[in-house]
Image: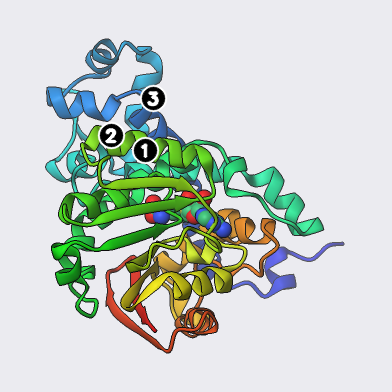
Amino acid sequence: MSQPVQATNNINEEKMNAFLGKVVGDFGASLSSVLTYIGIKLGLYEALAENGALTSAELAAKTETTERYVREWLVNQASSGYVDYDPASGKYSLSPEQRLALTDESSPFYVGGGFYVLKAMSRAEPRITEAFQNGGGLHWGDNDPDLFIGVEKFFRPGYQMHLVADWIPALSGIEEKLKAGGKIADVGCGHGASSIILAEAYPNSIVYGFDNHEPSIKHAQAAAEKAGVADRVKFEVAAASDFPDEQYDLIAFFDCLHDMGDPVGAAKRAFETLKSDGSVLLVEPMAGNSVEENLNPIGRVFSAASTLCCTANSLAQGGTGLGAVATEDVLKETVSAGGFTEFRRAAETPFNRIFEARR
Ligand SMILES: C[S@@+](CC[C@H](N)C(=O)[O-])C[C@H]1O[C@@H](n2cnc3c(N)ncnc32)[C@H](O)[C@@H]1O
């Protein structure tokens, strides 16, 4: 006769219940993230933001969607804390905080991009599972295109808030050079959000955006034209290890060095193409200096993204996979192997570590 599970495994009931409670929360968060993506894509949050409190029928009418789905969606969203519900009127609405975070792409609190990233990364699962078994990786460009859109939307608010106000001034004498007119390389620029912010802030400077993903470079070019800075931002398809030499005052890597197959080669190329008094700006995800320092909500997010995307991209390029939670020591070794002698943490935010390297 089999033994009761509790006796067999010596289970602590309180701990078991706490763990199961946590798992239920995670089930809810994971499933709800799909509904949040749908809400962003179909303009459901925007309609709530524009029209105030609405019933499910009113929201469905405003967004030309099917009421039955919208009704179910709203229950999920209210139970998630993403919309508010008033039982007296049966109407749903957004608080000012929910509205900023879910609908205002110009706000530093905007989080919508993260849901594009979640959707795209979950689509990578078959390829990543195979890579667990057989090695290899997944090239950036082979991901669901929502990854490229999502990364831009997710990171731009942070760049808008901190890049010009905090990060550039934290570098050694770079702000003055860019104000007077300097040359900037934005390596691994993706859709070019950071390049465009720099071009807008320093109109006397020229920004060169490089990425080896051609569709991203095309998108970046179009974005620069739309922003009216195409005269001073030049985008080009180029790998981090051999982008053109313009003798730059600033070479920036925004959330990309750890994705690269050959980050030492990228650091070497930066060393060769940087002016003697120039700086490298290295923006990397916030991570600790040991495994235990990553055992928190931020470490949970970045180690997951690293497994599904960053490490996979590096391994696909034949690299060793620095990954999104690379320690400061490992980043310093990587940059030093490129030739740099100075490396320091110049600034940080809850999500990012900002390093400066100099010759
Ligand atoms: C996470 S995205 C960051 C994009 C952009 N810097 C941003 O912050 O929005 C990483 C970028 O690095 C680019 N990348 C990866 N490996 C590269 C390499 N070896 N050479 C050039 N670009 C590379 C990818 O194509 C992708 O656009």
Amino acid at circle 2: Glu
Q: Quadrant of the C terminus?
A: bottom left
The answer to whether one can see residue 38 in this image is yes
Residue 224 location, quadrant: top left
The residue lying at 28 percent from left, 43 percent from top is 81
Element under label 1? helix
Name the one closer to the observer, 124 or 36.
Answer: 124
To which residue does mark 1 refer?
Answer: 221
How far apart are the alpha carbons under marks 3 and 1? 41 Å
Q: Which mark is residue 48?
A: none
How far apart are the alpha carbons under marks 2 and 3? 41 Å
Please report contact status of discs 2 and 3: CB closer than 8 Å, yes or no: no
Of labels 3 and 1, the one closer to you? 1
Position of 236 with respect to 249 (left or right) is right
Residue 293 location, quadrant: bottom left
Q: Residue 72 carries which label?
A: 3
Q: Earlier in the sequence, mark 3 or mark 1?
A: 3
Please report contact status of discs 1 and 2: CB closer than 8 Å, yes or no: yes
Amino acid at circle 1: Gln
Picture coordinates of residue 135, whole percent (x, y): 77, 59
The residue lying at 41 percent from left, 42 percent from top is 150
